[in-house]
């Protein structure tokens, strides 16, 4: 599932925007640019049901 599919599965840009306290326009941009990591982490916490079949990304071992 890509980020655009996830946005749709949650209920669309307006629903995601209200959940994350951002504008629907910001969420619409994430369809192409991807959902920012911190926002994705929050979505995993508040909607774990949507991520049951999606593996958790491994932390970047090369990050400082």
Image (spheres, rainbow, N blue to C red):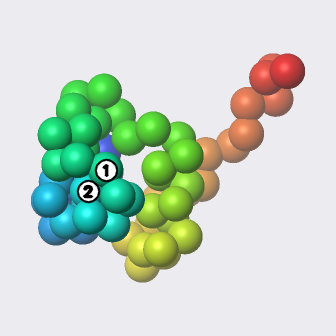
Q: Residue at x 33, y 66 (%)?
A: 19
Q: Residue at x 53, y 41 (%)?
A: 37
Residue placed most toward the observer, 20 or 35: 20
Q: Residue at x 23, y 47 (%)?
A: 23
Could you classify mark 1 by the number of other residues whose Cα lies within 10 Å: few (under 14), some (14-19), or many (20 or more)? Answer: few
Residue 51: image location, x then y, percent: 45, 67
- The secondary element bearing badge 1 is classed as loop
Distance Cα–Cα, label 1 vs label 2: 5 Å
Location of residue 58 by image quarter:
top right
Provide the residue designation for mark 2.
17
Q: In the rendered image, is residue 37 in sight? A: yes
Residue 2: image location, x then y, percent: 30, 44
**Location of residue 40 with respect to 52 vertically, above or below:** above
Residue placed most toward the observer, 18 or 42: 18
Which badge, 1 or 2, comes first in the chain's sequence? Answer: 2
Residue placed most toward the observer, 26 or 55: 26
**Location of residue 12 with respect to 60 vertically, above or below:** below
Residue 47: image location, x then y, percent: 43, 74
Q: How many marks?
A: 2
Provide the residue designation for mark 1.
22
Location of residue 30 by image quarter:
top left
**Location of residue 26 with respect to 9 vertically, above or below:** above
Q: Are marks 1 and 2 in contact (CB under 8 Å)?
A: yes
Q: Residue at x 45, y 38 (%)?
A: 36
- The secondary element bearing badge 2 is classed as helix
**Location of residue 19 with respect to 5 vertically, above or below:** below
Specify the quadrant that holds the C terminus. top right
Q: In the rendered image, is residue 4 in sight? A: no
């Amino acid at each position: 599932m890509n980020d655009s599919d996830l946005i749709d599965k949650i209920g669309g840009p307006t629903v995601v925007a209200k959940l994350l306290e951002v504008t629907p326009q910001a969420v619409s941009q994430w369809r192409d640019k991807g959902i920012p990591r911190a926002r994705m982490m929050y979505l995993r916490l508040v909607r774990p049901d949507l991520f049951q079949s999606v593996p958790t990304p491994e932390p970047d071992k090369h990050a400082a």
